[in-house]
Image (spheres, rainbow, N blue to C red):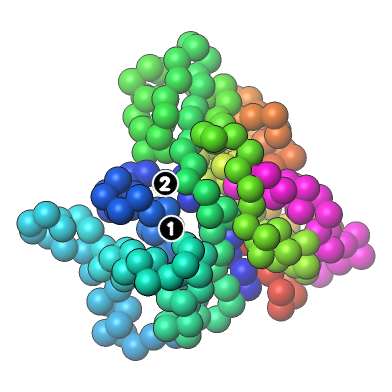
Amino acid sequence: ITAIVTVADDGGGSGMLREDLGMLPPGDIRNCIMALANTEPTMQQLLNYRFTDGSLAGQSFGNLFLAAMNGISGSFDEAVHRMGDVLAITGRVLPVTNQDVRLEAEFHDGSRTLGESKIFYAKKINNSRIRKVRLVPERPTALPESVRAIRDADIVVIGPGSLYTSIIPNFLVGGIADAVRQSSGLNPEAAEDAASEEAALDAAEEAAEEAPQPASRLSAREAVTTQEKMRFMRNTSTL
C-alpha cells in the first residue's frame, strides 16, 4: 500500500508549523503514517497526543515528531520515509510534491480565497459555490516516487476527503493525472474481482456528480476515474 498525500493543508497545528518552520504540513501525512504503523498502544497514544496548554496548545506530538525529523533530513519526503521506518509502517506514505503549495478557490460570485483552511468558511460566508480551485504556484512538480507508485499500482483508490480541498489538489500537481491515466491498475480484465472497490469508487463518483461544477481544467469525473476496471491486489496506491 502506498498513500500519496496532499500537502495543501494550512490549518490547525499543520498551519502553525508551516508558518513557524517553513515546512510542508505534517498533519495528513502523520495520520496516514499512524494508520499504517505497527506500534505499541503507548506509542500510538503518544503520537496522537495534543497539547492543551501554553504555546503548543492544539499541537499534536506526532506533528512535532515529523517536524523534528524534517529538521535532520535533507528533504520532506526523506523525513516522511524515516518516520515510517521508525514506526515500522506497512507500506509507504509519500507527499504528492515537495514544493510549498497553497490552494486557492474561485467562487461563482467572482470572489477568491487563498488557503485550504479558509475555503470552507469563505463558502459559507459568501453563500456561493466553488467554481474552480487551483494550486499556487500552478503545476508544481510531482514527487517522482509518487508518479512511479501510481503507474505501477495494481489499483488506484481515490479518496477519502473533500473533493475540492483534499482530492482534486493532488490532480493539479504536474504528472499525477497522467500517471493515473497510464497506470497499470486500470486493467479491464479485473472488473469481476472488484466489487468492494467499485462500491467505494461509486460513492466517490456520486459525490463528484453532486458537486456543482468541475473544479479546474480537470473535471471532477476525470479526477475520480471510477472505471470498473480495477481490482484489489497487494500493490495499492491511494491518493
Q: Which residue is mark 1?
A: 28
In the rendered image, residue 173 lying in the magenta stretch gets the answer: yes
Q: Residue furthest top?
A: 109
Residue visible at 70% across and 34% down in the picture: 218
Segment colored magenta: 170-194
- Which image quarter holds the C terminus? bottom right
- Which image quarter holds the N terminus? bottom right
Rendered view: 86 above or below 13: below
Rendered view: 1 above or below 208: below
Residue visible at 60% across and 47% down in the picture: 170
- Percent position of residue 142, x then y: 64, 52
- Percent position of residue 210, x then y: 60, 32
Q: Answer yes or no: do the residues labelled 1 and 2 have beta carbons within 8 Å?
A: yes
Q: Which residue is mark 2?
A: 9
Is residue 30 in view from this perspective?
yes
* Crowd band around label 1 with a 10 angstrom C-alpha radius: few (<14), some (14–19), many (20+): some
